Image (cartoon, rainbow, N blue to C red):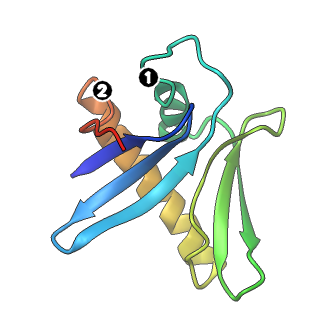
Amino acid sequence: MTAVIPGAGHRWSLISRTSTGADVLAHGDPRPSPRRDLPWRRPLELVRDGDGELSVVATGDGHFRWTFSAGDGHPIAESPGVYRDADTCRLGFADAQRAARAALGRGRAGELTRP
């Protein structure tokens, strides 16, 4: 199951629940949104559609994370720094895109849970 977990302010996390827990696929702290009730919706649409620029960076501890940014360089979403190599990190972005498609395909982003 895919879910969007709203955080403080406009912060959100896209998670994939498993039988043993949950994996954070992406998180973001977007610009203020006109949709105060669903501030994560537009960033998820951009991730789903690949409408932005993907960069993969080393975290300094032997791991990688991806950042997905708007054309002006503003970050839309990023992954946790858990990937062991750049190729796996790019595949992690593809997983986040599939999860965003699944969440938005239901007309709302997954199961909303308040922290």
63 vs 114, left or right, is right
| Residue 10 x %, y % | 56, 32
Residue at left offset 68%, top offset 55%:
67
9 vs 98, left or right, is right
92 shown above or below 85? above
The disc placed on residue 81 is none
In this figure, which residue is indicated by the disc labeled 2?
Answer: 108
72 vs 108, left or right, is right
Q: Nearer the viewer, residue 26 or 48?
A: 26
Q: Nearer the viewer, residue 7 or 86?
A: 7
| Residue 63 x %, y % | 65, 82
Q: Which element is circle 1 on? A: loop
Disc tally is 2
| Residue 18 x %, y % | 22, 67
Residue at left offset 57%, top offset 40%:
50
39 shown above or below 28? above
Q: Nearer the viewer, residue 9 or 90?
A: 9
| Residue 85 x %, y % | 62, 83
Query: Residue reaching furthest top?
Result: 34
Please state, as top left, top right, bottom left or bottom right, where the C terminus lies in the image: top left
Query: Residue reaching furthest left?
Result: 19
The disc placed on residue 38 is 1
87 vs 75, left or right, is left
Q: Quadrant of residue 15?
A: bottom left
Residue at left offset 82%, top offset 40%:
73
Residue at left offset 59%, top offset 44%:
28
- Near mark 1 (Cα within 10 A), the count class, few <14, some 14-19 or many ≥20, is some
- Which amino acid lies under the numbered mark 2 shown in the image of this protein? Arg
87 shown above or below 25? below
- Which amino acid lies under the numbered mark 1 shown in the image of this protein? Leu
Q: Which element is circle 2 on? A: loop
Q: Are marks 2 and 1 in contact (CB under 8 Å)?
A: yes
